[in-house]
Amino acid sequence: MAGRADSTVLAGARVVLPTGTVENGRVIVEGTRIAGSTQEGARTVDLSGHWVVPGFVDIHNHGGGGASFATGTAEDVLTGVRAHREHGTTTVVASTVTGEMDFLARQAGMLSELVEQSELAGIHFEGPFISPCRKGAHSEGLLRDPDPSEVRKLLDAARGSARMVTLATELPGGIESVRLLAEHGVIAAVGHTDATYEQTVEAIDAGATVATHLYNAMPVLGHRTPGPIAALLEDERITVELINDGTHLHPAALQFAYHHAGADRVALITDAMDAAGAGDGHYELGPLAVEVKDGVARLVEGGSIAGSTLTLDTAFRRAVTVDRIPVDDVVRSISANPARLLGLYDRVGSLDPGKDADLVVLDADFALKGVMRRGEWIVEPRVG
Ligand SMILES: [Zn+2]
């Protein structure tokens, strides 16, 4: 079972550091942190033939393990958090879905307590300020324009724990809302949007810094109507989220984003719903019924893709083995970049000494073999 390693040396692995991969490297864990040098009496775990990478950071995630961050109780949320931790996500932001404003405010209050307890890294509001033309799996009747005073209500309800709001910035109040978010240090994310290229540029100039699941729930890139995709990919101020589950994106679309934006501007996300780590069956996404078949979540009514059942260990493995993205680049986009976006890079996002001992052990085929969070094994590697 999982236990605290007071002083442990993980030896013999390929260790991915910000400066590159170290063959036959070592990671020293002292209590809850990564240490710079070995202490006496340290236990050594032989990880030859394995990779050690930083714990994954997911900035867009609606739940897992059969439980919803958007509508569940605090206990449900912890179930979802645990399910994702077992798949390597040591830092997770809870994403809501469109709902009544009062309900969202109450849910945000509950989630903010879990942020204070360090179970969550923050709250992401996805909806209700999104476009009815690109609503995806959000209830149309509950959508509303991004009036800054309404946006403000959600920020207040989150009591300092709001980290990101996805909005269709072309709607009335959109640009003012982006400014409001930027002023409060909350990420304004362009998404579920029907914006033109020019409207998207305006939103970026106003302070938007993230593209919510680039390509999904936005107009396609046309040669006379380049739309949001061109604007978001070309601007260095933007980090693009990508859902690498093999359903939301063609590998070439993912590679195109990596090549065009560069690995430092990609954040791999799950956009997971309850069924992540829980299997096929019937679920709910906010107020909408969802059926999960062969791991693909779709609305019962209309058949829209309704989030994913992805976990970040699968996203990592796909990125390396299917999409052929270099391991160092995948590590940046799954750990370092999202940690920076959250303002947490001094604590997590790399294996530098002094940071939290959050790490993932992968075998030579990039299958998950171990997960450590704050010095404690969540999944203890059975090796050596
Ligand atoms: Zn989402």
Image (spheres, rainbow, N blue to C red):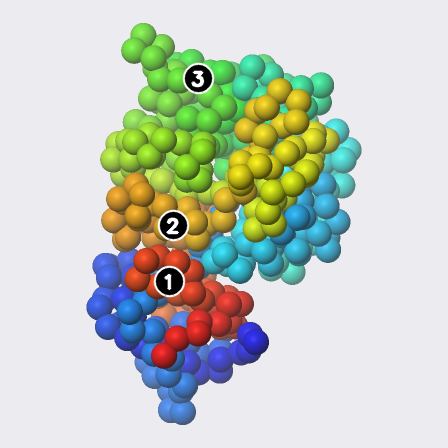
Q: Which residue corresponds to mark 2?
A: 316
Q: Are marks 1 and 2 in contact (CB under 8 Å)?
A: yes
- To which residue does mark 1 refer? 362
Q: Compared with residue 257, is residue 175 higher up or lower down, i.e. above or below?
A: above
N-terminal of the pair, mark 1 or mark 2, is 2
For the point 43% across and 49% down, the residue is: 314
279 to the left or right of 262: right
Are the residues flagged by discs 3 and 2 in contact, CB closer than 8 Å? Answer: no
Dot 3 crowding, Cα within 10 Å, few <14, some 14–19, many 20+: many
Residue at image position (25%, 49%) is 326
Look at the numbered disc 2 and give the secondary structure of its residue: helix
Residue type beneath disc 1:
Leu
Task: Check disc 3 and report the residue beneath it.
Answer: 219
The span from disc 1 to disc 2 (Cα, nearest Å) is 10 Å
How many numbered discs, if any? 3
Could you say whether the residue bearing mark 1 is in a helix, strand or loop? strand
